[in-house]
Image (tube, rainbow, N blue to C red):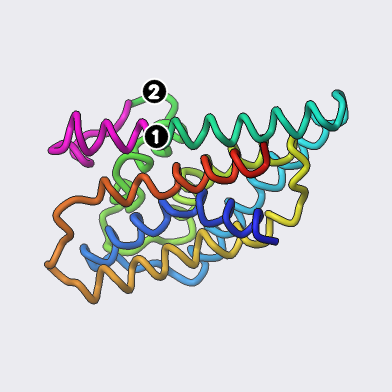
């Protein structure tokens, strides 16, 4: 169970930052919102692992395991590169602008939430309700889908789904409590912590390889 737990931790780490952002701004989440976030992440992971297992059956087991491990390793390197760009190349541009804007409203909202979790509060009410939680859960679950696909190809199996389903809303809640406790005391930089998911994925990829 070590691999599923570490994989769930890696793909859910962004939820902690989102929760801290809400805690700093005193934005509350309804119980239904936590449920929807967990279900969205779990469904994305379940779909990805199932699709990955189907792909894995089309190739020899050794090749599938190697390909899954290399994909996890690649995702980890990609995360580490993103953390390095955030902290070294652009240390002052944390979340001022969205990554992109799209004419398709649902996709545009998800992309903006990936960059700035505050964008999930669509009506600026100071509360994330069940309607807004759908976009938030989709944004937080995108990493789970990519990692789940590679995990499925590599033969990790569906045992990773329950930890992800619990970890995403759990990390949001923990981050919110931390943000409320810290109040106006903000960390000097969040970029070193953004390297943690990448490091975990790299370690998982190397071990499975």
Disc 1, SS: helix
Quadrant position of the N terminus in the picture: bottom right
143 up-or-down from 10: above or below: above
153 on left or right of 164: right
The residue under the point 51% across, 59% down is 168
In this view, the mark in front (2 or 1): 1
Which mark, residue 111? 1
The residue under the point 42% across, 63% down is 172
Q: Quadrant of residue 58?
A: top right
Q: Position of residue 144 (x, y in %)?
A: 57, 45
Q: Nearer the viewer, residue 48 or 60?
A: 60
Q: Position of residue 83 (x, y in %)?
A: 32, 38
Q: Position of residue 182 (x, y in %)?
A: 20, 72
Which mark, residue 84? none
Residues drawn in magenta: 80-100
The residue under the point 40% across, 49% down is 196
Quadrant position of the C terminus in the picture: top right
Neighbor class of circle 2 (other Cα within 10 Å; few <14, some 14-19, many 20+) is few
Q: Earlier in the sequence, mark 2 or mark 1?
A: 2
Residue positioned most to the bottom: 181
29 on left or right of 97: right
188 on left or right of 119: left
**Residue identifier under label 2:** 103
| Magenta stretch holds residue 82 | yes
The residue under the point 29% across, 34% down is 84
Disc 2, SS: loop
């Amino acid at each position: 169970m070590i691999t599923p737990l570490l994989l769930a931790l890696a793909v859910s780490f962004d939820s902690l930052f989102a929760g801290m952002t809400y805690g700093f701004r005193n934005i509350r989440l309804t119980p239904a919102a936590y449920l929807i976030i967990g279900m969205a992440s779990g469904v994305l992971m379940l779909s990805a692992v199932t699709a990955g297992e189907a792909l894995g059956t089309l190739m020899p087991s050794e090749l599938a395991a190697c390909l899954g491990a290399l994909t996890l390793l690649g995702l980890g390197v990609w995360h580490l590169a993103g953390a390095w760009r955030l902290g070294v190349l652009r240390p002052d541009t944390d979340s001022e602008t969205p990554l992109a804007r799209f004419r398709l409203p649902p996709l545009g909202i998800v992309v903006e939430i990936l960059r700035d979790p505050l964008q999930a509060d669509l009506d600026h009410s100071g509360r994330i309700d069940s309607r807004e939680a759908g976009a938030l859960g989709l944004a937080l679950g995108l990493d789970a889908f990519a990692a789940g696909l590679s995990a499925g190809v590599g033969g990790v199996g569906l045992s990773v789904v329950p930890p992800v389903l619990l970890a995403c809303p759990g990390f949001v809640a923990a981050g919110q409590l931390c943000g409320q406790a810290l109040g106006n005391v903000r960390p000097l930089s969040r970029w070193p912590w953004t390297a943690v998911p990448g490091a975990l994925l790299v370690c998982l990829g190397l071990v499975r390889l």
